[in-house]
Amino acid sequence: MCPAAVNDGDRRGYIIPIGGGEDKGPSPSILERFVDIAGGSQADIVVLPTASTLESTGPLYEEIFDGLGAGTVSSISIGTREDCNDPQLAERCEKATGIFITGGNQLRLSTILGGTDVAQTLRRINARGVPIAGTSAGASIMSEHMIAGGDADQGPSEGGAVLAPGLGLTNAGVIDQHFSERYRLGRLLSAIALNPFLLGIGIDEDTGAFIDADGMMDIVGSGTVTIVDGGDLKYSSAHSANRNQGLGMLGLKMDVLHEGCRYDLNMREAFAPPEDS
Amino acid sequence: MCPAAVNDGDRRGYIIPIGGGEDKGPSPSILERFVDIAGGSQADIVVLPTASTLESTGPLYEEIFDGLGAGTVSSISIGTREDCNDPQLAERCEKATGIFITGGNQLRLSTILGGTDVAQTLRRINARGVPIAGTSAGASIMSEHMIAGGDADQGPSEGGAVLAPGLGLTNAGVIDQHFSERYRLGRLLSAIALNPFLLGIGIDEDTGAFIDADGMMDIVGSGTVTIVDGGDLKYSSAHSANRNQGLGMLGLKMDVLHEGCRYDLNMREAFAPPEDS
């Protein structure tokens, strides 16, 4: 699904996929910047712990965002599709100035949120300016095409990535997380092999990609973001490979971005940190 | 060290790095092709098991090449630098029509062979047409700059690849092996970050790269060869990164080649299998 349309005079809010395992204190650069963008002491942050089955997940982030000086924080408990169509919960999201989607299992997110009032609300408020951050599974769910699973932990392979529809907050690419730590380049390549128009965005742990309304991505955190661009791919064996067979892919472009690097998702161009460019 | 000069009228022999774990029977495509190139029933193959400390390694390959119909096969036992300067052993290599360097530890190869009569003989006979194959450590040793170690099993990092001088049979790139299986993209990127003129050649297990005199590489086997080209790198943080810090690298090109794909190491260009191009 394409991102919701932006009304005249509005500007789309930040989308902030985080690769999981982000620093949580005492001065956590990624979460601090999210709180700041959401309004700081004026922020009204809603935490969505739906991906997680741990009851402690929502309260943990409430405590963190409180500690970082956010004005109001509340975690809302959504565990079923019925919850998602509860008008009070959608209304609570509607008035938020920032949404944070926790980690867990991205298929819980897509199967529970998909197509509900809450999902539509998230898409709509982002289009009118509200930033939405998500870590781990919460990062994966953001894109139009979501990596739901796949076992290509070595090279790219036929069937090495399983796609599902995501929230569609961006259609600039497909997002993977815990990227270097879980050796997911093969899985990301397997995903873009399916249709090279997809830009592969692999985000390490403790690393956030702050994507603004113009599609400019700014990297924050201790790891790197790996961008794989198959737009100029001149050959792929994806259409003729057998199940689990390794894929040939000729003509990939790759950028590895650390903190301070930026990437223009629309132009597909990487930029060095200002002091080095 | 640059490859030895080719005399007028001669043509350099194949260099055949193999990623380790190659199929050993009953119809092993990589080893069969090596025997064929070395002369088949007329071949006189010398196995160099120096990288290995197992006594069984040399005899194992003797048996395999015998079984594949090679005319003559002998494993020569070289365990010290003194052995390497034994005129009889250098002479045995001199009359070979094919050399096979087994796996083990590439630092054993560089420290025992480096600068000896045997090493010079290998360089000279390759320049006059004798094919030299090497698997695992035997693949790493072939290039001018050899990856001796390094622990970048995630993303590229400062210090993530340790280089040592290799045999210098080719200076087209730096070779890594067991590539996908041991998650060595980070290590290969760390190596090319040191000087982007290096082309990174990552070879999977049971995969051979047959490189001819013109620098054309032909892929054989069940895995893939990943080529990372930093020639157009527009930014790298390698000069300013702290020890073990993740590196930013912008502007990499990457090709993943399966059997039948080819790569021109001089032109840095990949080609699809003939039926698909």
Image (cartoon, coloured by chain):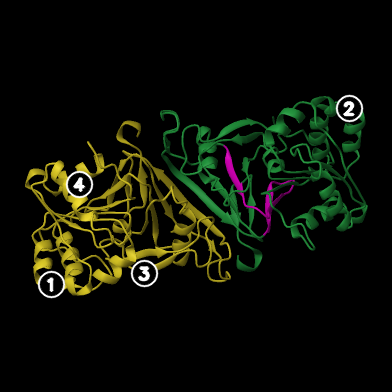
Chain colours: A yellow, B green
Residue A155, given in percent of the width and then of the height, sits at 54, 56
The residue that disc 4 covers is A34
**Which is closer to the viewer, label 3 or label 1?**
1
- Name the image quarter holding the N terminus of chain A: bottom left
> Would you say residue B206 sits in the magenta stretch?
yes
- Chain ID of residue with mark 3: A
Labelled disc at residue A164:
3
CB contact under 8 Å: marks 2 and 3 = no
Q: Chain of mark 2?
A: B
**Residue range corresponding to the magenta coloring:** B198-221
Q: CA distance from mark 2 to mark 1?
A: 85 Å
Residue of label 1:
A86
Q: Is residue B111 above or below residue A165?
A: above
SS type, badge 4: helix
Kindly indicate whether the residues beneath marks 4 and 2 are on one polypeptide chain: no
**Residue that badge 2 annotates:** B86
